[in-house]
Amino acid sequence: MRRCIEDYALIGDTHTAALVGRDGSIDWLCLPRFDSPACFAALLGNPRHGRWLLAPAGEIRRLRRCYRPGTLVLDTEIETDSGRVRVSDFMPIRQRTPHVMRVVEGLSGQVPMKLELAFRFDYGRIAPWIKWQDETPFAVAGPHALCLRAPIRPSERERP
């Protein structure tokens, strides 16, 4: 799928920013700062270069995106044949460590969601190893580490 820059919306925390595609994929993110190497770099290549996809598992009938007034909170309302959901993406103003927040809210019906998370450090060149601590997966590669915290346990599968 060929993408254009207008397919993306920006979220940020004043130290760094992420680009969220219309398909629900964060395809660009440098951490911990704007000038750091990217940990999601699918924008420059393909999903194997790192991304975080959060989207309905089925076909999308209608999609509407907008920022909440006066904020960089991106709300995406998605309608499928089985219902509607809202995905809110944002990065809270940083106190110490950066956070990317993705909140799914059911609006009507039932909408099965899919999550694909591929951490890749150094602009997609380094695939980390995954270490589980309690119910939390940590992606570690040299001095770099990221984790996913969620109210449900994600499943792990092989890389493509």
Image (cartoon, rainbow, N blue to C red):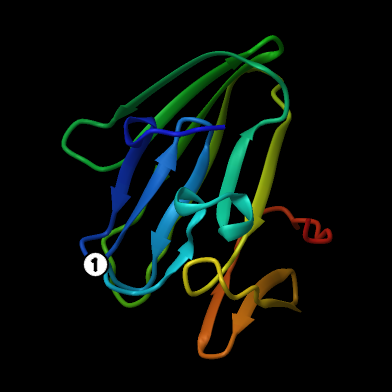
* Residue 66 position (above or below residue 96): above
Which residue is identified by label 1?
15
Query: Which image quadrant for residue 134?
Result: bottom right
Report whether residue 150 is seen.
Answer: no
Left or right: residue 57 compared with residue 87: right
Left or right: residue 36 compared with residue 39: left
| Residue most extreme to the bottom | 143
Quarter of the image with the N terminus is top right
| Residue most extreme to the left | 70
**x 47%, y 67%: residue:** 123
Left or right: residue 12 compared with residue 28: left
* Residue 115 position (above or below residue 160): above
**x 57%, y 59%: residue:** 49
Query: Which of 143/2 is in front?
Result: 2
Query: Which of 64/30 is in front?
Result: 30
Identify the secondary structure beneath mark 1.
loop
- Identify residue type, mark 1: His
Query: Which image quadrant for residue 13?
Result: bottom left
Query: Which of 93/121 is in front?
Result: 121
| Image spot of residue 10 (x, y percent) | 30, 44
Q: Residues within 10 Å of mark 1 (few under 14, many from 20)?
A: some
Task: Count the labels in the image.
Answer: 1
Query: Which image quadrant for residue 130?
Result: bottom right
| Image spot of residue 116 (x, y percent) | 67, 49
Report whether residue 36 is seen.
Answer: yes
Quarter of the image with the C terminus is bottom right
**x 46%, y 30%: residue:** 22
| Image spot of residue 57 (x, y percent) | 72, 29
| Image spot of residue 129 (x, y percent) | 71, 78
